Image (tube, helix red, strand yellow):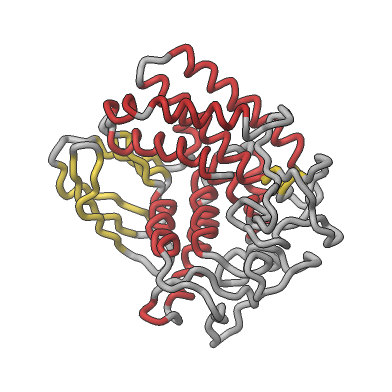
Amino acid sequence: MDATPLFVVLAGAYLERTGDLAFLQSIWPNIEAALHWMDRFGDPDRDGFIEYQSHAVGGLVHQGWKDTDDAVFHADGTLAHGPIALCEVQGYAWAAWKAGERIAHRTGRADLSVVFAKRAERLRQIFDRAFWCEDLSLYAIALDGRKRPCRVRASNAGHCLFSGVALPDRAKSVAHALLAPESFSGWGVRTLGAAEPRYNPMGYHTGSVWPHDNALIASGLASYGLSASATRIFSGLFEAAMYFELNRIPELFCGFPRESGEGPVLYPVACAPQAWSAAAVLLLLQACLGLTIDALDKKVVFCSPALPPFLEKVRISGLRAGAGVANLAVTRHDGEIVVNLLDNDEGYEVVVLPGRRRRDLNS
C-alpha cells in the first residue's frame, strides 16, 4: 500500500541528489501511473485518503509496515476493521504529490506541477482535520472503515513529520508526545505507547523499538527544526548499539524501559544484520546535520546542523552530488557546529543555514 507513493518520493529524492533529468524523463510514464493509481485505485471511495482492505483468504489484514493482525486498534483495544487509512501512508501520499510537483516543474510540465501542488495542499488540510487528536497531541494511527480515528499513541505519527504532511504548529506537540516516557524507552521510540491497552514491550509492532522507524522519526523532527529531539533519538540508538553483537543494530529490540547499568532487551528472532536498520544510522546522521543536496542548483546545504553528545567531529568523504564529489568535516567548536569544506571538485556551493528548518526550504 505504501510502496506506490514511496516510489514517487524516491524519484523526487533521486532528482534532488543527482540532477539526472534525462532519467526522470524516461520514467515519467511510471511516475504519472503511480500518481494515477493513488488518485483512483488507492482511494476507491474518493474521500481523499489512500486505504486498504484485505480480500484474499489468509492475506495480510494490514498492509502498512506494521503488518501484524493486531497492529491497528482503537483506544479501548478493539481491533480496527477496514478499509483502513493509515496516517503515515497519507503522509507518503502528500510527499509523493510534492515530489511530482517538483519533477513536473523541472521536466517542463508546468501545468501538471500546479495540479500536483493543489492536490498536496488539499490532502494536507483534510488530513489534519481527520487525523489530529488534540487530547493525544498526536495524529491517530489510522481511520477505520467507518472513518473513525484510532486514537492510540503510536510511532506512526512521527512519519507524518518525516513526510512533511504535518502542519508546522503540530510538530512540537508530536515531538513531546513521542519523547515522553510512555513512548520513549530511553533507547528509542516504541512502536506503541506503554499506556495503550495492547502494549507489550515484546510485541512485534505493539511496544518494541525499530531502528528504521526511529530514524524516520528523527529525520522528521530535524526537518521541523527540532534537532535536539533528533539527536536524543540518535544518542539512544547509538548507546543501544554498544550492547549488540558487533555493534550491529538489529531489525528491532524490546521496548522495556532503560535501566541504569543494563542494556536493551534483545528481541528473540530479530534479523541481524537487517538492511533498513543499517541504513538507519546514515539517516540519523543526515537528520542531525540537516544535510540536503540540490544537484540541479549545485548546492550542499546544512540546515541548523547538530551533533549528538557522543560525536565531536564527523568527516564526510566522497559525498556525491550530481557529477561532483565533496569531502567535508563537521566539528563541534566552543559549543558551535562548524562545517569545513576540504575538497570540492565540481564547485558545489556549501551553505550552512543556522536557525532554519529544512521544511522552509521545501515549501
Does residue 164 show up?
Answer: yes
Does residue 356 show up?
Answer: no
Q: Is residue 264 left or right of residue 23?
A: right
Q: Quadrant of residue 45?
A: top right
Q: Picture coordinates of residue 363 (x, y %)?
A: 50, 29
Q: Residue furthest right?
A: 76
- What residue is drawn where x is 21% and y is 55%? 317
Q: Is residue 301 left or right of residue 129?
A: left
Q: Picture coordinates of residue 284 (x, y %)?
A: 43, 57
Q: How many marks are shown on the rendered structure?
A: 0
Q: Residue furthest bottom?
A: 261
Q: Is residue 239 left or right of residue 134?
A: left
Q: Is residue 299 left or right of residue 155?
A: left
Nearest the eye: 312 or 204: 204
Q: Picture coordinates of residue 10 (x, y %)?
A: 42, 40
Q: Quadrant location of the N terminus? A: top right
Nearest the eye: 310 or 338: 310
- What residue is drawn where x is 65% and y is 25%? 122
Q: Quadrant of residue 83?
A: top right
